[in-house]
Image (cartoon, helix red, strand yellow):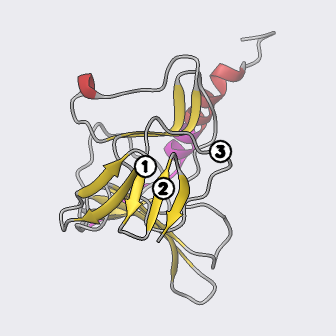
Amino acid sequence: MINSKIDRDGLGKLAFEDAVEYAKLGTTIVVGGYLNTDLIKVRRIDAEVGFIGGFTIESGRLVWTRSGYFGGTSRSLKLGSGTSKEGVVNVTFNAETDGRFGVAAIGSNSGGACIYASRNLNASDRSYPQANTTYAGFFDGGVYVKGTLSSELCLADNFGCITSRDGNGGINYYQGIDFDFGSNMKFRKGLLVSIA
């Protein structure tokens, strides 16, 4: 309280108290299994289907969708496990509605990253950014890019040249930057030195 006025920390509590007071003045209608009221305070709700704001509950998942200009689903956010091709958090979007990003993580913290991903389930096996660094993305494990990868600066501890891939995602490769491409071309220290 400052000069008998509510300070910032009290505003949230005051807003809740106002909602409770408003609900006390309202009515509650119960018809069979239908309940119509202004405020419900409970310790637990078990629901297979329902609505929470703009989200629907579908088979235990929270699902938010938005229609595009042409009527189809332009954007969606799903929380909870779904099909084998969906993530626990699954985001889809296209250009039919406003917004440029499916996922936007903005900020920095020393020793942190906007997006962190690790393939190691055991915490003791994971790697993290050093305390004096910050990254937009930090990946602890292999990263595969199918398509063009562009960079303003490329640095690496090691290089290799993939010679083949197997059906399980494994690769065979030559380590280093000295490589004979068949019998036609030879690369030494990353430079093409011979063409047959």
The residue depicted at 25 percent of the width and 27 percent of the height is 125
Residue 36 visible at all: no
Q: Which residue is mark 1?
A: 178
The residue depicted at 24 percent of the width and 68 percent of the height is 83
Rendered view: 113 above or below 172: above
Name the kind of residue labelled 1 in the image: Asp
Q: Residues within 10 Å of mark 2 (few under 14, many from 20)?
A: some
Q: Which mark is residue 153?
A: 3
Label located before the other in sequence (2 or 1): 1
Label 3: state its secondary structure: loop
Name the kind of residue labelled 2 in the image: Phe
Q: CA distance from mark 2 to mark 1?
A: 5 Å
Confirm or deny contact between disc 2 and disc 1 (CB under 8 A): yes
Q: Give the image quarter of residue 67.
A: bottom right
Q: Which residues are magenta?
A: 19-31
Q: Which residue is mark 2?
A: 187
Q: Would you say 181 lies left or right of 149 here?
A: left
